[in-house]
Amino acid sequence: MNELKMKIVAAYGDFLVDASGQKYFDLCMGYGSVSLGHNFAGVIEGQVKQLQNYSAPGFVETEIFAQAKQIVENYLDGYYLYGFYSSGANAVEIAIKMALTSKRRPKIISFAKSMHGKTLFTSQLGFDSYPGTPDQIIKVPFVGEKEESDILNICEEHMRSGNVAAVIIEPIQMSGGGFEASPLFYCRLGALAAHYGVIQIYDEILIGFYRTGTPFFHKTYGLKPDIVLTGKAMGNGFPVSAILLKDDFVILQPFRGGGTYFNHPLACSSIIATLNAFKQLHVALHITRIEDCILKHLPAHGLSGKGALWNIDMGSPDNMNAVVNELMTNKIIVSFYDRHIRLFPNYQVDLTQLINACQIVKRYL
C-alpha cells in the first residue's frame, strides 16, 4: 500500500494541501474531529480572539468556560458539564476514576474491540494486544462475536456479584468492524445497570454532536446513561473532550478531576464557535444528504454506519490495500485498518466529490 508520504502545509474546506501544491480530498478529517471542514473561518476567528486575551489561566475560572459550558449543556437536558479535557482518553480515564471512587467497587465492564483511547489503560479496555491488562477490567464480547442475549447474560452475571462499578460502551464500534447493537440491547443493558447499581458510561467521543445525524446517540433511544463522554466534532479539530454527568450524579470527595489543560480557554472558544455554526448551518439536514448519498452510491454488502460515519468491509487486507492505493492515486484520503476503510466526511462535504470517492470504492466491492 502507498505510504502517505506527502507533507501537508495547508488545508481548507474538504482539502489538504502538500508542499508541492497538490490537494487531497480528505475523508478522514482528523479521524472525525474536523466537523465543519478545515480552517473554518468562524472557529479560527474565535481562537485568535481568545488567544489575544488569555490562553492559560490555570485553576482560575474564566468567563469563556461558563459560556462553553452553557452551550454544551443546552444539548443535553438533565445533565451538567463536569469539564473539558484535551483528549478522549483523558476523559475516559477520569470518568472511570469517578465511577470507581463513587461506587467503591473494583471492576469495570467494557466491550472487546471498542476504542476508548490510546493510553495503556484505555487501550486495555478494548483490545488484548497490550501488556499488563489489569484484573479489574472485565472485557465482554460485542455484537459480531456473540448473540446479544448471550452478551447481556455475561454482563448480568458479573453485575450480580456486586463488584462492578461501571460499564463503559462505545455504541458504534468504528475501530472494531463498524458493529452496532439493536435498540433493545442498549435498553436492556441500561436496565441491568440500573438494577444492580452499576454506573453506565456512554463513550460518544466520536459519534456525538451530529456525527451519526442526531446530536447524541443515546437520546435516539431515550436512554439516560449516568456519564456521557463527547469530544472530536465539538471542537472542529481542536483537541478537546468533555464529561457530562446526569443531574443526580454526585462525586464523592476528595476527587482530583482536573489537569493542566482542564477547561482550556482555546478549547472553549473552539467549542462555542463550532456549536454555534452547527445551528446556523443546519448541519443535521446536510448530514441526512450525506447518508442518502452513501446509501445510494455504495452497495449494502459490507457497509455499516449512518450520517457522516461509515465503515466498509473490503473483504480482505489485500483488497483494502488496493482500494486505498487507487484512492491515493486519485488524491483521496480515507482512514483504514485491517480489511476496513472508514469515511468521516465533514458535515459540509461536497457531495460531488464524495460520489466520486464512492464510485472508486464500489469497483472493489
Image (spheres, rainbow, N blue to C red):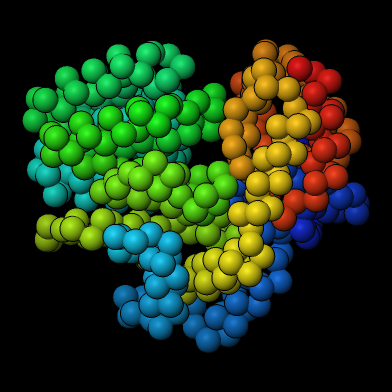
* Front one among 10 and 183: 183
Q: Which residue is at 18% across, 39% downward?
A: 194
Q: Which residue is at 17% across, 44% downward?
A: 100
| Res. 39 image quadrant | bottom right
Relative vertical location of residue 277 with respect to residue 127 in this rendering, above or below: below
* Residue 323 screen position, x and y as percent: 79, 24
* Residue 305 screen position, x and y as percent: 58, 33
* Residue 307 screen position, x and y as percent: 61, 42
**Quick check: can you spot residue 107?**
no
Relative vertical location of residue 158 with respect to residue 191 in this rendering, above or below: above
* Front one among 97 and 174: 174
Relative vertical location of residue 84 with respect to residue 212 in this rendering, above or below: below
* Residue 152 screen position, x and y as percent: 27, 21
Q: Which residue is at 67% across, 13% downward?
A: 315
| Image side of residue 196 versus residue 307, left or right | left
- Name the quadrant of the N terminus: top right
Q: Which residue is at 55% across, 61% downward?
A: 235
| Res. 331 image quadrant | top right
Residue at far bottom of view: 53
Number of disc labels: 0
| Image side of residue 270 versus residue 88, left or right | right
- Name the quadrant of the C terminus: top right
| Image side of residue 25 versus residue 279, left or right | right
* Front one among 110 and 247: 247
| Image side of residue 18 versus residue 206, left or right | right
**Quick check: can you spot residue 42?**
yes
